[in-house]
Amino acid sequence: MAKLNANYDKLAQGYLFPEIGRRAKAFAAAHPDKKILRMGIGDTTEALPPTVVKYMHERVELLAHRETYTGYGDTSLGEDALREAVAADYARRGAAVNADEVFISDGAKPDTGNIQGIFSDDAIVAVQDPAYPVYVDTNVVAGRGGAYNAERQAYERLVYMPCNEHNGFFPALPQGKVDVIYLCSPNNPTGSVATKAQLEQFIGYARANRAVILFDAAYRDYIRDSSLPRSIFELEGARQCAIEFYSLSKGAGFTGVRLGWTVIPKTLTLEDGESGKAHRLWTRRQNTYFNGASNVVQSGALGALSETGRRECQVIIDYYMQNAALIRATLTDLGIKCFGGDNAPYVWLKTPNGMKSWDFFDKLLTEANVVGTPGSGFGPSGEGYFRLSSFGHRENIEAALASIKQNLRL
């Protein structure tokens, strides 16, 4: 008899963002006269950069003719030209990455979930808390989470690294030995950015314990402070202990277009494998499970990484960061304590009067008709906090903030 994966039943609740959508939809059905103003899910809204569109159009035209049509690529790992462009992009940032260490995919979210498949079933996993839900949920489904403790709002086998106001929303090193460490910088949801000194501590820990750091750099392009690292590979020793993920979703507006990459250095060494084995395992995994990213989209990514494309992407990033500054300034004027929004597109606020995160979600929706993201959906340390996204048309951001100022009873 076929049986289902019982680990799915251990997931404590529905995935965060569909639950937000469900509540917003229910409110809209009950109040058809109200316009819902969305500042929740981090979905981009501005048009693709012209150079990206140009490169994609040119590739589509090639596919329209028998003489220039291409099907499956030579590899599932990405087209050579794009992998080389990614390596060159890292070099511009002072990070040493070889083209054959770059794995092109359809986004950082699936990669950060799928990567745990190359690690042992009994690996001890540490996550920043709060954290992007995919880190936790995919390991629970894989059987590494253990039972859910409702009182702690945490899984018993996962190691939570609390991030709060007292530590600047960057965690201390794990107590004892762990095997896999998820770090995200700039962080989703808190908007905090790790310093070089902070990452050096984790690199030292990982090398001493033969652990691996899974470094999510999906929001690297939003960092304004030039002293802050955009890649963990800017730091010495990272090539021996880290894997990095990146996505063009927020850097070039590819949320629906879908393209990202994972960098696994051939020098990465784990506890029970020689140097290069993790790279070989992920190569095998991708060739087995994945047929490669869309060739049209890969051409668009080449456009985004071109000199002109990078300038055009920066214009859009600046636009979203202006939204973030506006959000933070408005909330601060209302007496709401805020974090982030200066080197990241998210503003992380402390819920007024000690409200629970979901209670504030309902209050914000009911009174101001604004949708945000409850902090508790990102982990136990997110309780009492709330995330607002700067992704949106300026006029919609302004309308949402005006409604908050006028209607939210604090």
Image (tube, rainbow, N blue to C red):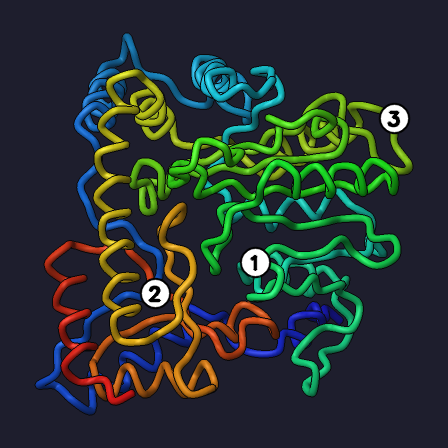
Q: Which amino acid does label 3 sit on?
A: Glu
Q: What residue type is labelled 1?
A: Gly
Q: Nearer the viewer, mark 1 or mark 2?
A: 1
SS assignment at label 2:
strand
Residue corresponding to mark 3:
274
SS assignment at label 3:
loop
Residue at 47% over, 14% down: 88
Q: Nearer the viewer, residue 285 or 145?
A: 145
Q: Where is residue 266 in the image (x, y as percent from the top left)?
A: 73, 21
SS assignment at label 1:
loop
- Name the side, left or right, on which 235 lies relative to 319: right
Residue at 82% over, 30% down: 269
Residue at 69% over, 75% down: 154
> Local crowd at mark 3 within 10 Å, few (<14), some, or many (≥20)?
few
Between discs 3 and 2, the one toward the N terminus: 3
Residue 391 visible, this orientation: no
Q: Do the residues labelled 3 and 2 touch (CB within 8 Å)?
A: no
Between discs 3 and 1, the one toward the N terminus: 1
Residue corresponding to mark 2:
388
Residue 297: image quadrant is top left
Residue 247: image quadrant is top left
Residue 201 visible, this orientation: yes
Question: Residue lying furthest top in this view?
Answer: 67
Residue corresponding to mark 1:
168
> Local crowd at mark 2 within 10 Å, few (<14), some, or many (≥20)?
many
Between discs 1 and 2, the one toward the N terminus: 1
> Local crowd at mark 1 within 10 Å, few (<14), some, or many (≥20)?
few
